[in-house]
């Protein structure tokens, strides 16, 4: 079965989607959209599209290309609602970049529409297909960390600086996905604090956030666009050790550092037997695995709720964090 796909958006991530869907044996790119005509020319030359591929700056024209089965949307988040809704109403399956929308009620509406239309609404949570995240989940299940206590994540860089959303909406969703997956639960209380140094429409370029889960586990996130010390590091701390996912480390992206404290008289001291283990992981492109899963869901006619519902939950959490940020860090309960 060759699934025919239109790609909306040819930015950094859109280019990766074109490449993956073009190379996959079960899909074919039949239309590509971008409002920038010069960009379209560059993309057409880069991928050497067949003459029958629709290359246009009009997204409606692309959606009307003959024989389309699915649409992949890699446009600014503020455009997602209208594009996803139009695609679903036309009977297409949808692969949408995260976040699904910037509004919880709109995300919920799209999820319900996908269910009604019996179409896949696949929200791209690429990190869930990262071998280090999959391997980390196995470590958590093994019990090697002992009692889970808290977690922390840092995502910093000097660019790109977004102009449509703040650092929270740009960066937090990745660590949210990972923590939710490793813990098998979602936070029910959130707090966030933001600072805006750049004259960028009041968008916070530094955000710190606190997530509290029903189990009592807490995670602390640090996100910033103004830090040349690029970090992509997340850790889960337990009573017996710490699991670390450091994406910037090519040699050891996933490590397990085991160790704990013991009482010695009236003091605490590190117990003997501390160790550092590099967790072996498969080398594979996460986005390629995500695209393959999307195509498999279409081919197998699997229910559409799995990815859409998770995507809606992420928007709900981000909206709660935004509310807290706007209230100067007030605790927000997620109902």
Image (spheres, grey):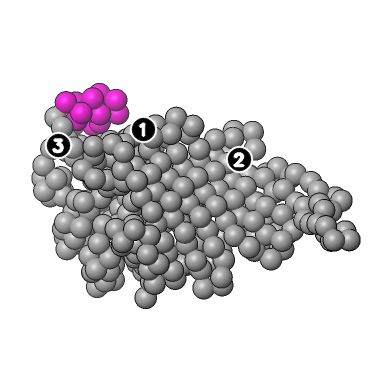
Say if 18 sits above or below 241 in the image.
above
Q: Nearer the viewer, mark 2 or mark 1?
A: 1
Q: Nearer the viewer, residue 231 or 324?
A: 324
Helix, strand or loop at label 1? It is loop
| Among the two numbered marks 3 and 2 on one chain, the one whose residue lies closer to the N terminus | 3
Dominant secondary structure of the magenta stretch?
Answer: helix
Looking at the picture, does residue 306 appear above or below residue 242?
below
Disc 1 crowd, CA 10 A, few/some/many (<14, 14-19, 20+)? few
Q: Quadrant of the C terminus?
A: bottom left
Q: What element carries label 3?
A: loop
On the image, the x and y values in percent for residue 148 come to 64, 63
Q: Does the magenta stretch include residue 40?
A: yes
Task: State if disc 1 and disc 3 touch (CB < 8 Å).
Answer: no
Where does label 3 land, which residue? 35
Mark 2 crowd level (few <14, some 14–19, many ≥20, 10 Å Cα): some
Please state the horizontal and vertical placement of residue 294, each as a whole percent of the image.
Answer: 38, 54
Kindly check if marks 2 and 1 are in contact, taking CB atoms under 8 A apart as contact: no
The label shown at residue 75 is none
Nearest to viewer (mark 3 / mark 1): 1
Mark 2 = which residue? 253
Q: Can residue 120 be seen in this view?
A: no
Magenta stretch containing residue 127, yes or no? no
Q: Dot 3: few (<14), some (14–19), or many (≥20) neighbours within 10 Å?
A: some
Which residue in the structure is indicated by mark 1? 159
Image depth: mark 3 or mark 2 in front: 2
Q: Give the range drawn in magenta.
A: 38-50
Q: Residue at x 28, y 40 (%)?
A: 162
Compare residues 113 and 260 and report the one nearer the observer: 260
Q: What element carries label 2?
A: loop
């Amino acid at each position: 079965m060759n699934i025919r796909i239109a790609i909306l958006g040819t930015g950094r991530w859109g280019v990766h989607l074109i490449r993956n869907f073009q190379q996959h044996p079960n899909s074919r790119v039949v239309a590509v959209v971008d409002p920038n005509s010069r960009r379209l020319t560059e993309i057409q030359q880069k991928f050497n599209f067949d003459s029958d591929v629709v290359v246009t700056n009009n997204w409606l024209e692309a959606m009307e290309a003959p024989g389309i089965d699915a649409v992949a949307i890699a446009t600014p988040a503020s455009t997602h609602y209208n594009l996803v809704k139009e695609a679903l109403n036309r009977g297409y399956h949808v692969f949408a970049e995260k976040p699904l929308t910037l509004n919880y009620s709109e995300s919920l509406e799209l999820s319900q529409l996908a269910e009604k239309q019996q179409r896949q609404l696949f929200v791209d949570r690429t990190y869930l297909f990262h071998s280090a995240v999959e391997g980390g989940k196995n470590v958590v299940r093994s019990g090697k960390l002992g009692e889970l206590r808290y977690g922390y994540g840092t995502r910093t860089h000097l660019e790109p600086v977004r102009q449509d959303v703040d650092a929270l909406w740009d960066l937090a969703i990745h660590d949210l996905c990972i923590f939710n997956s490793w813990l098998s639960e979602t936070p029910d209380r959130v707090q966030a604090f933001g600072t805006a140094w750049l004259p960028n429409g009041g968008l916070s370029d530094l955000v710190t956030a606190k997530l509290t889960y029903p189990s009592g586990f807490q995670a602390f996130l640090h996100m910033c666009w103004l830090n040349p010390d690029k970090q992509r590091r997340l850790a889960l701390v337990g009573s017996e050790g710490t699991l670390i996912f450091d994406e910037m480390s090519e040699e050891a992206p996933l490590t397990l550092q085991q160790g704990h404290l013991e009482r010695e008289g009236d003091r605490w001291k590190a117990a003997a037997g501390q160790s550092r283990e590099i967790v072996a992981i498969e080398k594979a492109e996460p986005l390629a695995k995500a695209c393959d899963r999307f195509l498999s869901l279409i081919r197998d006619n699997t229910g559409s709720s799995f990815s859409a519902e998770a995507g809606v939950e992420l928007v709900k959490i981000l909206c709660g964090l935004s509310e807290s940020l706007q209230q100067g860090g007030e605790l927000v309960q997620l109902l």
